[in-house]
Image (cartoon, helix red, strand yellow):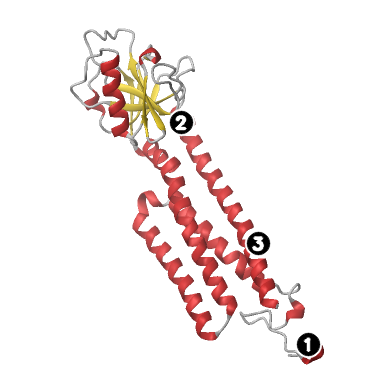
Amino acid sequence: MFGPGGQSQRSFSQFGVPSPGKVSAKPLDFVVLILLPWLIFSLIVSLYVFAYQEFAPLVWALVGASALLAFLFISMGSASGKAAQIALGLLVLTAVGMAVPVGLMVERRYMSSFWEVDSGAEYYRVSPLAPAASYGDASVMRFESGSFVDTHRSLGFMKIGDVYCVAPVLGQSTSLEESSPQYWAVGKNCCNQRGGFDCGDVGIQGASTGVVVSEGLGSYQSAVRMAVAAYELKASQGPNVFVRWTANAELYKVELWDRALTTTAIASGMHFMGSSAAGLLLARGLLR
């Protein structure tokens, strides 16, 4: 096909759409360059967020298959000389490389805690004096009426830029001279070195529920040892249980789900805008 002056024009479509004059009427190249990488990105992020907990091997297998698809486009484009296929492969490979850390971040920040709360055991009227070893499978602990977080005996332990905060959970009849705290309310970056504990719903009157925390246990344990020494408390001979203090465990679980959905939707929307810009720039380049 020849344009003005007898010079050959490169066909816009490297996928089989032949006419550059019909780009606006049949924008197949735009659709492929923009939507396919975005769909793969959104699919992988969603798999990590909603399926990784029970189907981790399958999720990794699909990630590998997506990467192989990207390399297939690149190799086919290199063999046939079609620049659009190479560009598509690079966009898909970029989408896979971005989706994995985003999906893992959302899963670890929100969904791992959600599944723990959703599937773990729930105990009612737990006494702060009860042996913590009796609740090794707990995910939610509703302490007996009158239980509270002793914010005056809280302590913050600094580690790699984060402050790991702990404060003992006590009951109305707890005597620190005779017993040692086994249950500790915890949080990150929500207290001073001593005192000022403001983690979770500790400021809400009547809050008496703890959602068991399973991350950062080593750092929280170090903070507990420091608090025991600083406030001259009796050290527990058994395991300590670390909880996020909340007024409503069900609402906390819903918030985790909503945050995961919101973060996933924002990441998908941002990638769509980036994929659209990249696709348009590449498509314009193919016209030259």
Q: Name the amino acid type tagged 1.
A: Gly
- The image position of residue 273, as x and y in percent, is 64, 56
Q: Secondary structure at mark 1?
A: loop
Q: Please identify, in this view, whether the residue under mark 3 or under mark 2 is nearer the observer.
A: 3
Residue drawn at point x = 52 percent, y = 61 percent: 95
The quarter of the image holding the N terminus is: bottom right
Callout 2, which amino acid? Glu
Estimate the x, y position of residue 82 in percent, counting from the top left.
58, 81
Quadrant of the frame with the C terminus: bottom right
Q: Is residue 85 left or right of residue 57?
A: right
Crowding around mark 1 (Cα neighbors within 10 Å: few <14, some 14 to 19, many 20+) is: few
Kindly identify which residue carries mark 1: 3
Give the residue type at disc 3: Ala
Q: Earlier in the sequence, mark 3 or mark 2?
A: 2
Q: Alpha-carbon neighbours of circle 3 within 10 Å: few (<14), some, or many (≥20)?
A: few
Q: Which mark is residue 250?
A: 2
Give 229 or 59, whichever is nearer the viewer. 229
Among the 4 quarters of the image, the one containing residue 165: top left
Please provide percent x and percent y for residue 100.
45, 55
Q: Earlier in the sequence, mark 1 or mark 2?
A: 1
Q: Secondary structure at mark 2?
A: helix
Q: Residue 128 sits in which quadrant?
A: top left
Q: Which mark is residue 277?
A: 3
